[in-house]
Amino acid sequence: MYDLVITNGLCVTASDVAPLDIAIQGEKIALLASSGSLSNQGKRVIDADGGYVMPGGIDCHVHLQEPSLFGKGTSADDYESGTRSAIAGGNTTIVTFAPVQKDTGSTPLGVVRETRALTDGQCYCDFSFHVLLATASPQALQEFPKLREEGISSVKIYMTYEALKLNDGDILSVLLAARKNKILTLVHAENGEVLEWLTNQLEAAELFAPKYHSHSRPPILEAEATNRAIALSALIANTPILLVHVSDIGATARIRDAQTQGQPIFAETCPQYLFLTRDDLDKPGFEGAKCVCSPPPRDKTDQAAIWAGLQNGTFAILSSDHCPFRYDDAIAGKKTCITESHPLGQFKYIPNGLPGVETRMPLALSAEKLTLTKLVQVTSTNAAKLYGLYPRKGALIPGVSDADLTIWYPGKLEDLTIRNAMLHHNTDYTPYEGQRVGNWPRYTIIRGRVVWDRDNGGVVGRKGYGRFIRRDAAVDVWEEVREFDLEML
Ligand code: URP
Ligand code: ZN
Ligand code: ZN
């Protein structure tokens, strides 16, 4: 007898869709067999009833308990509420950030240890961290080999935000060190100087409302920075980079072009660029602040380009960029930017970011714009490959892969509408309030344990069950990358 059998489901992986039973022994996938053949071979049997059964969702862009970027404001979710929300949305692993700040003496290894301490006994799902690098100091870069020993294989850098921004020389130094250590560099591409200039212009014209967040960061500013990041990667002999939260058609075209030329440029997009537009920032009063994130949501034409980019492989990854701040909160949330002189706040002080870890998978499946295999690729398998979790995560390989699964309802749920009240984050709103979806994760299973059972108790997993997962170098990314030499230039 196997510990757990999932019978009668339609099994979907990154490459195949087939009616298969899945047997789980301990924490691992043990066997895939023809549908119905294992239905009496489990100590526990879950009848998937014809619903899709997939590798568990991997959301590799989640912000929890980070120090504020905007002076005021504190992330609404900690590791407990963030991972609780993650499992209720079909995620089995998340990757969050361990932030190295400028001029504070913090170091990559130090912040990894500090962030691990925050997770102690708190997490419902498995997790890892990207190191968020706000410095290219030699001290920070010389810790890269040790990061790899600690199981960290990615760093994120910013081309904007005074507190985090790296200049072009710094970026080159990071790329060089990352290349030597097979660390993938994630890039937040927005031109910080142009953004600052535009913000000053808008403020001088007394344009402070939330919608001007969008005017302060027009698409060209993202496309320019994207182009520059790609050029810097090319300069260091095609060092692989991954552009995060890409929002607009111009940046998408530039990325596609570089990929067509054979450059190792990878990209991620997020649901806010598929389901929201700049009009959502122009709601009455201060409401638009709910959708303030960076880059901001764009137009319908951009949305169409982003969907096409997911379909044609320009974007390897769809993650949430979950970065929640409470809306009706003047102490730690969006309303910290409201003062007597600015009753609608000042857009430049609105904490940037949206909640989304729980809604990512249901929104993506319900849109019915991606084939089922593509859906698994962009919500799970590609993240596992690029972030060095594969094939332990993101796959269903017997004897090798962890038994991490998301099981959906059969057919469509006709009357399911997203309401904040049904979500498990610690935020007082969702930007997707009122959005109809056709399905929701019915079960989430992590390393063989059911942690989310929507019809029988909801969150049934145990806080603290989630484990830190050591990550390796990205799969299929570094093979062609040779040692960099100045003679190459
Ligand atoms: O607005 C956003 N995206 N907030 C999160 C921080 C980041 O840059 O990803
Ligand atoms: Zn970012
Ligand atoms: Zn982010």
Image (cartoon, rainbow, N blue to C red):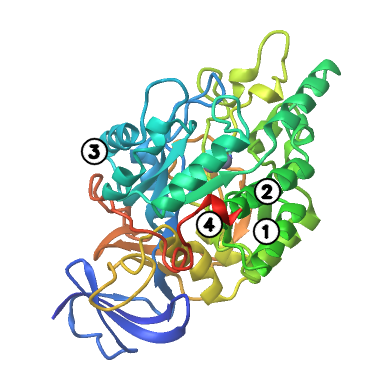
Q: Amino acid at mark 1?
A: Ile
The residue to which callout 1 is attached is 255
Q: Residue furthest left?
A: 1
Give the spatial CA distance, label 3 vs label 1. 38 Å
Can residue 429 be seen by looking at this rendering?
no
Give the spatial CA distance, label 3 vs label 2. 37 Å
The residue to which callout 4 is attached is 240
Can residue 358 be seen by looking at this rendering?
yes
Q: Amino acid at mark 2?
A: Thr
Give the spatial CA distance, label 4 vs label 3. 33 Å
Q: Amino acid at mark 4?
A: Pro
The answer to whether marks 1 and 2 mark residues whose Cβ atoms lie closer than 8 Å is: yes
In the visual, does 30 lie left or right of 171?
left
The residue to which callout 2 is attached is 226
The answer to whether marks 4 and 1 mark residues whose Cβ atoms lie closer than 8 Å is: no
Residue 212 place in picture, x, y as percent: 77, 30
Q: Element type at marker 4?
A: loop
Q: Element type at marker 2?
A: helix
The residue to which callout 3 is attached is 120
Mark nearer the viewer, 4 or 3: 4
Residue 7 place in picture, x, y as percent: 31, 81
Give the spatial CA distance, label 2 vs label 4. 14 Å
Give the spatial CA distance, label 4 vs label 1. 12 Å
Looking at this view, is 385 or 415 the one in front? 385
> Dot 1, crowdedness within 10 Å: few (<14), some or many (≥20)?
many
